[in-house]
Image (cartoon, helix red, strand yellow):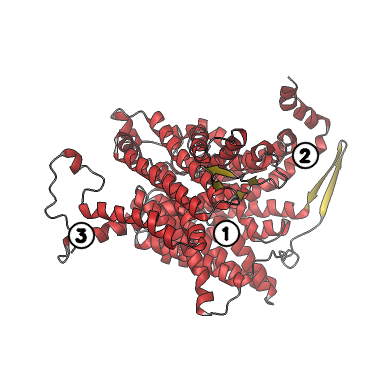
Amino acid sequence: MHVLYLIFVDPFMQMVHSPDLLMQTLWDGLVGGVLYALIALGFVLIFKASGVFNFAQGIMVVFAALTLVGLHEHGVPAFVALGLTVLVMLVLAFGVERLMLRPLVNQSEIILFMATFGLTYFLIGFGQLVFGGNPKVMIAQDLYLPSGAIEWKGHFGFVSFQKIDIAAVIIASIMVAVLAVFFQRTRIGRALRAVADSHQAALSVGISLEQIWVIVWFAAGVVALTTGIMWGARSEVSFSLQVIALKALPVLILGGFTSIPGAIVGGLIIGIGEKLGEFYWGPLLGGGIENWLAYVIALGFLIFRPQGLFGEKIIERI
Amino acid sequence: MLYREVGQYKSSYAADMAVFPILQDRIGIAVILVIAYVVFPLIGNDFLLNTILIPFLIFSLAAIGLNLLTGYTGLLSLGTGAFMGVGAYACLKLTTIFPHVNILIWVLVSGLFSSAVGVLFGLPSLRIKGFYLAVATLAAQFFLEWCFIRIPWLYNYSVSGAIEVPLRTFMGVPMTGPTATSLTRYLAVLTIVVVLTWVASNIVHGRIGRMWMSVRDMDLAAELIGIRLFRTKLLAFAVSSFYCGVAGAMMVFLWYGGAEAEVFAIDQSFLILFMVIIGGLGTLIGSFFGSALIYILPIGLRLIPGNFGVPIRPAAAEQLTFVIVGALIIVFLVVEPNGLARLWQIGKQKLRVWPFPY
């Protein structure tokens, strides 16, 4: 009985009694969720356009951030370094398309998945070889990112918002909006959507698959760079960051592999659910449940909707 | 020239359906077994046995386990590491509670515990497919990993939080624990791997294997011809997890002699998946090839700079190994997506018709 009380009554009592803590937890969850959503967005872009489950998205985040900081350490001004990093991501996109995707075209999904794994290893080794394996500090100030916190006092307590978190949410929203406009309004965006619908049909109307692949990998690279800057500014730039890619996977299955709104909504659900669960229910289980809670939430959704919340309906034919 | 099937007539269906229909293959297997059982123990030093052969065999068994699930039944799993962990922890608990039973029996029995857990986490496989299932198995990976760390009962409340392998003897010879020689452990591992490989070969060549493969090729069609998907998929999870569990138990008890929960982390799952894919999906021999390549390649790469006197910092060598392994994986996949087993088959076919091209 006591256990049931602890699980079903006590956490909600706590929420009602101290709404400021609840607000703080929700806000932390929201920010975490936005960053998960950004990584998931990179996955979705690539999965939609090329059917590749890109495991390397996590390391791309680290690699992009590391390139930026590494270049700055060598005396390159911050914004020039930013431009150069974007260029590096473009080169990476070309390389991946040329050396990995093109020879592996028409192979089964699992082979492509494994190839991105090889890419992960390669980037881990290459990044460490060039920039060293030690954690680095993101050059937040040089990029004019705000620091410090705003404290907001209501009549029930106070909540503190880190300025960098607010910036992260704003920048992420802008980026999603830009991507949405890019997809809906431009010629390339239309081509991307055509490729996502059907490779063969897109080819038959003269869309170059290779070109599209470079563009989506480049777009995913830019998304990765943004995520890397934000995440790096919140903590630091290190190779342990790549495990956040694993955090983004439940977001993906929750939202559906092919849906951009799904990635965002899924990211927010996972981010907030994870923080709430850890804060209110975690102590019952001895803490540290953050690592698997997201997967269990996602698994629960999947039992009822096997294609994710926003995924395309699965139609099977013989 | 030597590898010809000319003149080898089959007079029964059994002979025609044999796993090794060609005499030379049977001789080859016999030679390999003799080398494994006689030559290696005679010439092998501790380095060869402990650093190369024992891990190679253990990883092969784990790869066979995953291959039964991913290669034969088409269910992608990323929870292999955790299932291996279940085997290891089950074995520790069993041998703590019943210290007088032979440890090798517990190594095999702990596979059954792993099976049970595997079936539990395989339940969603009926509704979820493809990469969605892969991510679902990650739930198993992270949840079990958390259990290994957070439940002290599992590691006997040891202060370090690690598994400490106790001394167990088999007919007076130390089998596990610090005093066991690498030779005894090697022979134990070898025997278990040989027997389980033989069992796996019989499973996949029989009715169950055909059921699995039909599910892999198209599960809807398999259901229409009367295969019960639910049972078949769960059976695949059970058998696969059994193999992984045994491999995990052997890894801790017969190789490391002590391990922390980190050994069963997600990296291990990916490593085994690598072995399966580089070796060849849906082939048993490929599991051995993949394990040999993926496990021994980094060791070899690390030895190269030292032996050739190339001045390189150890850290840089480590990073270079990552770069090379990553690049090689992509190259392998580009050159031969069907894995090393396919190359082996092509080679045999060429030998069969030599000197003619076909």
Quadrant assignment, res B209 = top left
Q: Quadrant of residue B341?
A: bottom left
Rendered position, B347 above or below B195: below
Q: Tag 1, which secondary structure?
A: helix
Provide residue B176's location: percent of width, then percent of height: 56, 47
Q: Mark 1 or mark 2: which comes first in sequence?
A: 2
* SS for callout 2: helix
Q: Chain of mark 1?
A: A
Q: Position of residue A31 (x, y in %)?
A: 70, 47
The CA span between labels 1 and 2 is: 32 Å
Report the residue at 61% width, 43% height from top: B145
Q: Is residue B20 left or right of residue A219?
A: left
Q: Position of residue B305 (x, y in %)?
A: 52, 75
Residue at 19% in and 59% down: B352
Q: Amino acid at mark 2?
A: Met
Q: Name the residue beneath numbered marker 1.
A: A59
Q: Quadrant of the C terminus of chain B?
A: bottom left
Pointer 2 residue:
A23
User: Measuring 21% from the left and 52% from the top, which residue is drawn there?
Assistant: B23
Residue type, numbered disc 1: Ile
- Secondary element under disc 3, as helix, strand or loop, is loop
